Image (spheres, rainbow, N blue to C red):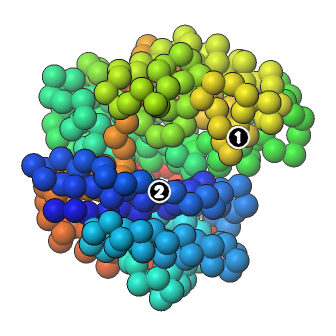
Amino acid sequence: MRMSVVDVGSNTVRLVVADAEGGVPLPVHTAKWRLRLGQRVRPGNPIPEEDVEQLAEAVAGAGRTAAKWGAAGPLAFATAVVSAAPNRGEVLREVRARTGVELCTLPGELEAELTFLAARRWMGWRSGPLALLDIGGGSLEVAFGRGRLPDFVASLPLGAARLTHEFLEGGQDPPAPEQLKALRRRVRHQLRDVAARIRWEGPRTAAATSRTFQQLGRLCGAAPGRHGPFVERELRRADLRRAAARLAELPAAERAALPGISAPRSAQSLAGAVVGHTAMKLTGLRAVVVCPWAIREGVMLRHIEDGPSWWAEICRRAEGAAPPGPVPLRIATVTK
C-alpha cells in the first residue's frame, strides 16, 4: 500500500509519500513548499486571502505530486497556525474547493498523541516509560506513557514562532536581557504543572521531535542529517543551556551561520532553545533522544494500525470555527 501525508506547518507544507508494507511507513519521496505563515500571521489572527491562495496552491501541488508517485489522496492536516485562526473553517473549505484535498486541523492533544505513537514505534519497547517533547511554531506538545499511546498529553501555547512574535520582535536585536527574562518567566509559568506531572511519572527515556529540536541537536554537536536517520542523536540539557546563551548573543540574521540553524528559522531559534532547555530543566530530563519520526509518521501509523475511520471522523469535525485569541493551555489524560 502506498500512502501520502501533507503537513501544513507554520513555515512549510511538507509531503511524505511512503510504502506501508509490513505496517511500517517507509518514505519513497518527500517534498516541501515554503509558506512562512508563522512569520506573517500572528497566532490567533485571521489568515489573509492572499495567504489562503498560497496555501491552496501548495496543497494542490502536494496532491498532484502524491498522485504522480502513485499514492491515494493524501491525509492532509494543518497545525497551530491554521487551527488557531478565527477563520479556520473558511480556510479549510476554500482549500478543499480549490484542490479537492480534505485538509483537517488537529487538536493539540491529538498532535501529542500521534507524535508519541511515532516516537514509541521508533524507540521501541525497551525505552520503557517514555516522555515526549515536541516544539512547533504555535505550541509545545508534551506526552508521557508506558504503552503504545500516551497516558497523559498536554498542549501548551509555547511554540517557537508564537513566542518570538510575543517577546523577541520590536525590540533590540540581539534581544535585551529584560526580553529574555520575560520570555523565560512565561515558559516557566506555563510549564509548571505539566512538568510536575512528568517528574512524578519518572520516565526512563525521553524523546524530542520536530525540526526545532533537530536543529538544536545539530547546534549542540549531533550528527548532521546527511548521516541518515539511524544515527543516534542525543541532546544534553547542559549543552542546550550553552547553545541558548550563544544564540542570545547574536542578531537573528547571524544565527543562520551556526551549525544546524537554517535561515528561515534563525529568528525563532532562540525562543525554541529557551523552551527546550526550560522544559528539560523543569521535567528533570538531563538528556533527550532526537527522534526522526514525528507527527507525519504518527498519522500514517495510526492509519495503518487503526484503519481510515478515525481519520474520517477527525475531518468531519474539522470545519467548526476556532475561537479567536490565543490557544489556551490544554491538558488531557488519554483513555486507550
Q: Residue furthest right?
A: 172
Determine contact: label 1, label 2, CB under 8 Å: no
Tell which of 234 and 325 is nearer to you: 234
- Please tell me whether residue 192 is drawn above or below residue 93 in the rendered image: above
Chain-order first, disc 1 or disc 2: 2
Identified at 62% across, 42% down, the residue is: 160
* Front: mark 1 or 2: 2
- For disc 2, the neighbor class at 10 Å (few under 14, some 14 to 19, many from 20) is some
Q: Is residue 159 left or right of residue 18?
A: right
28 above or below 243?
Answer: below
State the image quarter where residue 238 is shown: top right
Q: Residue at coordinates 40% horizontally, 21% vertically from top-left?
A: 233
Q: Secondary structure at mark 2?
A: strand
The image position of residue 161, as x and y in percent, is 65, 47
Q: Residue at x 72, y 18 (%)?
A: 246
Q: Can see residue 328?
A: yes
Amino acid on which the number 1 mark rests in the picture: Ala
Residue 70 at x, y percent in the picture: 27, 69
Please give left or right for residue 21 compared with residue 174 in the image.
left
For residue 263, the mark is 1
- Number of other residues with Cα within 10 Å of mark 1, as a class: few under 14, some 14 to 19, many 20 or more: some
Badge 2 amino acid: Ala
Residue that sits furthest to the left in the current view: 22
According to the picture, the residue beneath numbered tag 2 turns out to be: 31
Figure check: 88 above or below 171 = below
Residue 290 in picture, x, y percent from top left: 41, 28
Q: Secondary structure at mark 1?
A: helix
Give the residue displayed 72% in from the left and 33% down from the top: 256
The extreme front residue here reads: 68
* Residue situated in front as seen by the camera: 25 or 199: 25
